[in-house]
Image (cartoon, helix red, strand yellow):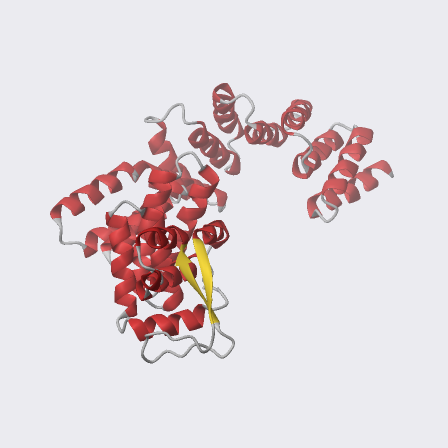
Amino acid sequence: MKFRIESHLKKKLDDVSFLQLKADAEISVKGFKIPDEGLYVPFLTEELAQNIKIKKENEVLTIGGIMRGMIYTIGIDSEFKYKEAYIEFMQAVESNLEEYVLFQGTKYIEEEKLLEGIIYFKALIAINPENENAFLHYSINLLRYAEECLTEQAKLSRLFKQEAKDFLEQLFQVGYDIPLVNYHLGFLAREDKQYRKAEIHWNKALEGSNEEDFKEHVVYLLRSIEDLVMYETGYEAILAGNPQHGLPMLEELEGKYEEWWNLLFFIGLGHRQLGQYEKAIGYFDRVLELKSDQVDAMVEMAICLSGMGDYQDAVDGFLRALEVGGDNHEVLSNLAIAYMEIGDYINAKSCVERSLQLEPNDEITQLCQKRLIELMNE
């Protein structure tokens, strides 16, 4: 079982102190034998220091303290070298170990000690990688911790959310299909701009719940992404080369979002795919009015100009795109074609060479090179 956040958590081992129990040490745990090589047992350093201050010498080291240290250690490092011995020890102490760890982790959450709770739930997964309750509690509290405690640490917040997503998706895949799993997966999908996926999960959450307040909330969420689902469906159809399917959906949205440049870009791209170059140019113009450095719109406009036979303006458009966006082998190959059309073989050759330096195996540029050689030898 792999954990994305484990490397981040390992610094929490500083909270743990280890004491060595030799093989002949007396320990009042029936059914557990200390290994012949001895065993290093962990204690929470703060708890140990407190016990030293207020307890008698023979009461400082407690079985409960060892248990807490072991759970904490395994929760921080799921591959800790003494993990199996720790599990054996804890099972000898507590016959319902998994229920115990889950209960104690939940107590931490109730006390607003979110990271401690997360460590306990992670430990439970390390103890039993098939404990679905552990997966659920771990995932939900990873999300809560990311939202409440990592607002100023975007990279770490994303890491915790991705960890939550991994475990929620595992629950979903094994059929642990409860509304709460789909509810949170819907939010994560929306955050990743996967609106149709969010819609699927929220519909499943809606179907699986009998709680009216929850269902009302999910219906609200579904309505909030209706246009985004239509947009995603439309632009994916266009990217798949099916503008006849995608354009009507995007054009239906246009009246509501006249300054949404992404939407206008894909409408323009759809018209370009249909050979409706003048109409497409109108949309790319609008994109550039809203976002003057949008390189893809510059390139698409130049492609339209080439399609209309206006090669000199196309050359100017491709050059502008390179000036704004830097060298790009696809733009250079298109520019080379436009140069060839106006008979400027020297500049075409320069573009082909630059493109091949960037992407030596690009088939389009290789074809451009072959055609250029033919033209120059005529």
51 sits left or right of 83 in the view: left
Residue 200 in sight here: no
Nearer-the-camera pick, 341 or 31: 31
Nearer-the-camera pick, 105 or 94: 94
The part of the image, by quadrant, that contains residue 378 is top right
Nearer-the-camera pick, 290 or 155: 155
Nearer-the-camera pick, 104 or 192: 104
Residue at x-position 67% and y-position 30%: 326
Residue 138 in sight here: yes
- Vertical arrangement, residue 243 with respect to residue 173, above or below: above
Residue at x-position 67% and y-position 24%: 323
Residue 222 location, x and y as percent?
Answer: 25, 42
Residue 254 location, x and y as percent?
Answer: 36, 28
Residue 253 location, x and y as percent?
Answer: 34, 32
Residue at x-position 20% and y-position 56%: 208
- Residue pushed farthest front? 56
Give the position of the N terminus as an image quadrant. Answer: bottom left
86 sits left or right of 344 in the view: left
